[in-house]
Image (cartoon, rainbow, N blue to C red):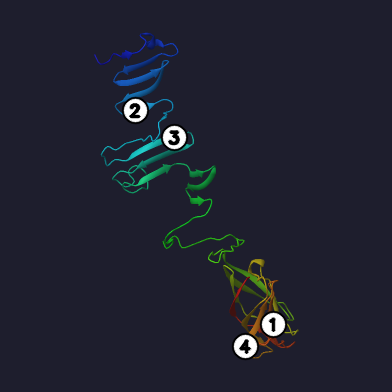
Amino acid sequence: TGSTDAYFGDGAALVTGAASGTAAVRSDNGDLLFSLAATEKARVSSSGLSVTGSISATATAETFISTAATTSPRSLHLANTGGDVYFGIEGSSSGGFFTGSTAYATVVYSTQRVQTIIGGVKRTEVDSSGITVTGSISATSLVDISAAGAGQIKFPATQNASADANTLDDYQEATYTGTATGMTTSPTGTVSYTLTGNEATLNLPEITGTSNATTFTVTGMPAEARPASRKTVLGRAQDNGGAIVPVRIDIETTGVLTIYANADAGAFTASGSKTLAECSVTYTRV
């Protein structure tokens, strides 16, 4: 009548529970059930095939094929108590199944982070904040970061020095407070600096006061901006109320700037006004 069951197996014992080893194929009100030891293992219904347990293939080069002509999304869905993951292809409607996807895009979709493990080592991890990579990233063409929300590369606070001549291993923009000596007081100014690889640029502010020594220094440079050997650059200064002239500035390995009264390393007058004029100087840190 369409409401009764049909059994293929060990007989009526299948109805109330069969002994161990009993196998059966049973029709259950339109569904086709496959049972083993009175336990349902697979069911075919109008919605498809559901399996209780694992599916194993021992042959080589096994392929799961789903090639029916359709514009609908197709997917393989795995889930546990921690979340869901889908492997699939989007349909003709952008984001119709995988939120945020485009039409016919191949998609890995998960409610949790997605990791790539190679040889027991996590190499990539994708989560809501972006992608994290362990190891190097290689590109064989242009690396384009020109999008409106991009255009930034972040380096570590401490330089990870590279011996490769073609590797940019540092970039930093920062400031420090420079304190002058050789004056009756200790005037200060904010020094901004930019580190690009082994090159450093200091933007020196105007620092002025009353001289009480023939020397003039500015201290306070942080370690990361200091050169490995003394560097000599040309700056601007004023001695005893005179004109602002080009002067020699030595940048010591301690980070101290030794400023002279002229380009020939002359001494300052130990009286009157003394000024480091605003200027920018560039040197290498090696």
Q: In which quarter of the image is the N terminus?
A: top left
Could you say where residue 76 lies in the image, as x and y percent from the top left?
A: 38, 37
Q: Which of marks 4 and 2 is nearer the N terminus?
A: 2
The x, y position of residue 192, in whole percent, is 59, 72
Measure how far apart labels 3 and 1 are at the Cα level.
73 Å
Crowding at mark 4 (Cα within 10 Å: few <14, some 14-19, many 20+): some
* Badge 1 amino acid: Gly
Question: Which residue corresponds to mark 1?
Answer: 209
From the viewer's perspective, tell me whether residue 217 is left or right of residue 64. right
**Element at label 1:** strand
Residue with the mark numbered 3: 79
Mark 1 or 4, closer to the camera: 4
Work out whether mark 2 precedes mark 1 in sequence or the reverse, and give the earlier one.
2
Quarter of the figure that contains the C terminus: bottom right
> What is the distance, in whole Å, between disc 1 and disc 4 at their CAs?
14 Å
> Would you place residue 276 above or below residue 121 in this image?
below
Camera-near label (2 vs 1) is 2
Whether residue 96 sits left or right of residue 142 in the image: it is left
Question: Which structural element holds mark 2?
Answer: strand
Left-right relation of 177 to 169? right
Q: Residue furthest front?
A: 60
Residue 15 as seen in the image, left or right of residue 192: left
